[in-house]
Image: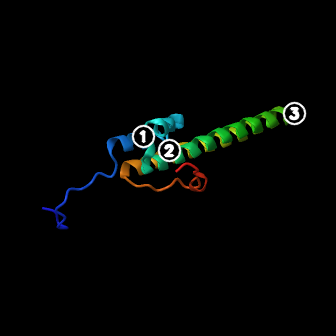
């Protein structure tokens, strides 16, 4: 017996296909599956997560390019061994920070899908252009 006297069956938060394509949206370029698969690409929930996955992938690629350019500039400008080491250490710390943030956003998005919540990713919500 339902303690809230709801005699109707509970609706699932996500169907299996919605959940699968929403989770795939946060794993690298796999958001293409949610974008291209025929029935799910029209679903509002899948589109929401695909949009966030797109922005996450684009941000990750842009930050990786910026870090490589920064590494090349620091390597070209460091004339001593100590300067070269400091430059490599700085770019390694920045690369690790970008990787940890990206993985953190991926896990956060996947957890939101698994719990049935449609909360946007922190700091990325403003830039999600695909809805």
Q: Which is nearer the N-term, disc 1 or disc 2?
A: 1
Q: Are marks 1 and 2 in contact (CB under 8 Å)?
A: yes
For disc 2, the marked residue is 50
Q: Position of residue 69 (x, y in %)?
A: 76, 36
Q: Under tag 2, what secondary structure? A: helix
Q: Residue furthest bottom?
A: 4
Q: Position of residue 53 (x, y in %)?
A: 53, 44
Q: Pointer 1: residues within 10 angstroms few (<14), some, or many (20+)? A: many
In the image, what residue occupies the spot 59% across and 55% down?
A: 123
Q: Pointer 3: residues within 10 angstroms few (<14), some, or many (20+)? A: few
Q: What colouring does the structure picture have?
A: rainbow
In the image, what residue occupies the spot 87% across and 33% down?
A: 79
For disc 3, the marked residue is 79
Of badges 2 and 3, the one in the foreground is 2
Q: Is 93 situated above or below 80?
A: below
Between the C-alphas of marks 1 and 3, the distance is 50 Å
For disc 1, the marked residue is 21
Taking depth in this image into account, of 3 and 50 the one nearest to the observer is: 50
Taking depth in this image into account, of 65 and 129 the one nearest to the observer is: 129
Q: Position of residue 74 (x, y in %)?
A: 80, 37
In the image, what residue occupies the spot 62% across and 41% down?
A: 58
Q: Is 36 situated above or below 122?
A: above
Q: Position of residue 52 (x, y in %)?
A: 53, 48
């Amino acid at each position: 017996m339902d303690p809230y006297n709801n005699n109707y069956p509970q609706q699932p938060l996500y169907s299996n296909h919605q959940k699968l394509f929403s989770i795939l949206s946060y794993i690298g370029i796999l958001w293409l599956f949610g974008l291209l698969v025929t029935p799910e690409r029209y679903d509002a929930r899948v589109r929401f997560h695909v949009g966030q996955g797109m922005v996450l992938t684009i941000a990750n690629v842009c930050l990786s390019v910026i870090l490589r350019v920064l590494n090349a500039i620091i390597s070209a400008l460091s004339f001593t061994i100590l300067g070269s080491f400091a430059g490599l250490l700085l770019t390694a710390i920045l690369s690790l920070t970008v990787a940890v943030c990206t993985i953190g956003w991926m896990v956060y998005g996947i957890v939101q899908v698994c719990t049935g919540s449609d909360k946007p990713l922190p700091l990325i919500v403003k830039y999600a252009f695909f809805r």
